[in-house]
Image (tube, helix red, strand yellow):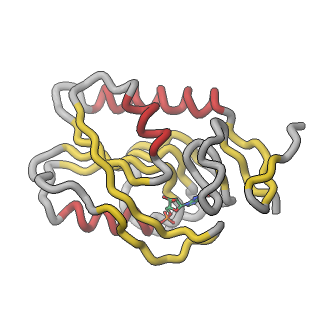
Amino acid sequence: MQQPITVKDKQFTLSISSDTIQNSIQNLANKINEDYQGKEIFFIGVLNGVFMFAADLLKRINIPCTISFTKVASYEGTQSTGKIKQLIGLPENLEGKNIVILEDIVDTGFTMKSILNQLKQQNPADIKIATLLFKPDSFKENYKVDYRAIEIPNAFIVGYGLDYDGFGRNLPDIYTVVK
Ligand code: 5GP
């Protein structure tokens, strides 16, 4: 068994290897490439955590696309505050566009709901959600999470873009907190 690693003041153990992450992203890209044939995609990435996933996914998209980013924060330490702070707003002129929102992780679904509500006001042609990680036992909303690369149990994770108090985003694998 792998030795736990320390990020800031907590210990974490390896839970998803870089190879598994990359294979899951390839499968997800294949589905998106198939579903959007003959169309254009306007990706909107939700910063900060999405930066690695967005980069690795877009390299595998082979149909015309553009990308822009919005920035929100709801976590402090290992807990969701339940309040969404919008730090960079959504792009404008989304009317008639096929939007795919990119998230690192959908947990309770609260952050995504607030982004969806704002996006709908701009009358895009279509809105779909693609997330690297999904916590089914934690999800409390009733909208569809269209593309989910990896489903995980309800525990705090770091790595591959996701942080613990700002640290751990640089790790190529994903680690789960040791209770
Ligand atoms: P939700 O609003 O769906 O509960 O949470 C979404 C946001 O919370 C994600 O974009 C992410 O920033 C953060 N988050 C949720 N679960 C985790 C986790 O296990 N680890 C980390 N680092 N962030 C998480």
Percent coordinates x, y for residue 49 in the rendering:
50, 51
Q: 87 and 151: which one is in front?
A: 87
Q: On the picture, is 122 further left or further right than 17?
A: left
Residue at (56, 42) in percent of width and height: 150
Q: On the picture, is 89 further left or further right than 53?
A: left
Q: Image height check: is 76 above or below 33?
A: below
Residue at (69, 59) in percent of width and height: 155
Q: Image height check: is 136 above or below 73?
A: above
Percent coordinates x, y for residue 139 in the rendering:
52, 63
Q: On the picture, is 93 further left or further right than 170?
A: left
Residue at (31, 26) in percent of width and height: 34
Q: Which part of the image, by quadrant, shows the C terminus? A: bottom right
Q: How many marks?
A: 0
Percent coordinates x, y for residue 19 in the rendering:
63, 27
Task: Kindly indicate the quadrant of the structure image that contains residue 172.
Answer: top right
Percent coordinates x, y for residue 142 in the rendering:
40, 65
Q: On the picture, is 137 further left or further right than 54?
A: right
Residue furthest to the top in view is: 62
Task: Kindly indicate the quadrant of the structure image that contains residue 118.
Answer: bottom left
Residue at (35, 68) in percent of width and height: 86
Q: 56 and 23: which one is in front?
A: 56
Q: Which part of the image, by quadrant, shows the N terminus? A: top right
Ligand 1 is found in which quarter of the picture? Answer: bottom right
